Image: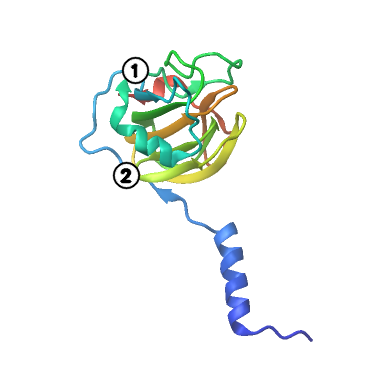
């Protein structure tokens, strides 16, 4: 017979419960509900001439004061580029920081899975909850999948801090209602 001290057992059960039974993050809808235009707002800053490399999200926050509005994004469907192609709607390819704001619309309440993809760093928030985070460089790949509870149909605020250091770039999102297949989020559910 094996004996386990109570404290160790409690911690082990809490770790298992946290992994298996974590409650979805409850999103807060926009209040009042907006009537947005299509797309997302974006502001950019660039570290060039001579290029200073953006290493992490702290640098993005430091650059926020010098960000300038850019051409709105069509949504979050910016697939992996070729090296040297412009980042999102900006005219530069490397050392670009962006702040993206707007809304995402859910047509019905329920539990959804959201998954951000980025190259490089991202800090993504929807309805007051963090849904994606990478504080460094990576190729175009999934960050993490997050379960969220949507209490009512409608628009939810979205905010993303993003940077592209060098190489290729991408910024995308997948979504799906619990129990359904997760798919790329269509551009027409984003508003500004």
Q: Is residue 105 left or right of residue 52?
A: left
Q: Residue furthest left?
A: 32
Q: Is residue 111 visible?
A: no
**Residue 83 percent coordinates (x, y):** 60, 17
- Residue at position x 50%, y 46% in the image: 147
Measure how far apart labels 1 and 2 are at the Cα level: 27 Å
- Dividing the picture into quadrants, the one containing residue 69 is top left
- Dividing the picture into quadrants, the one containing residue 181 is top right
CB-based contact (under 8 Å), mark 1 and mark 2 = no
Q: Residue furthest right?
A: 1
**Residue 114 percent coordinates (x, y):** 50, 38
* Mark 1 closeness class: few <14, some 14–19, many ≥20 residues within 10 Å: some
**Residue 119 percent coordinates (x, y):** 55, 29
Residue picked out by circle 2: 28
* Mark 2 closeness class: few <14, some 14–19, many ≥20 residues within 10 Å: some
Q: Is residue 104 above or below residue 128?
A: above
């Amino acid at each position: 017979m094996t004996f386990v001290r109570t404290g160790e057992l409690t911690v082990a059960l809490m770790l298992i419960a946290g992994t298996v039974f974590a409650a979805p993050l409850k999103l807060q809808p926009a209040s009042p509900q907006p009537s947005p235009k299509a797309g997302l707002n974006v502001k950019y800053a660039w570290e060039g001439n001579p290029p200073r490399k953006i290493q992490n999200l702290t640098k993005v926050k430091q650059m926020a004061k010098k960000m300038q509005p850019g051409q709105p994004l069509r949504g979050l469907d910016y697939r992996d580029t070729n090296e040297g192609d412009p980042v999102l709607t900006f005219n530069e390819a490397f050392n670009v920081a962006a702040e993206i704001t707007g809304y995402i619309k859910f047509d019905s309440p329920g539990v959804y899975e959201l998954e951000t993809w980025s190259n490089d760093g991202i800090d993504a928030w929807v309805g007051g909850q963090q849904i994606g985070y990478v504080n460094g460089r990576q190729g175009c790949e999934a960050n993490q999948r997050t379960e969220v509870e949507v209490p009512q149909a409608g628009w939810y605020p979205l905010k993303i801090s993003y940077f592209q250091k060098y190489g290729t770039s991408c910024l995308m999102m997948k979504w799906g209602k619990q129990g359904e297949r997760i798919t790329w989020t269509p551009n027409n559910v984003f508003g500004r």
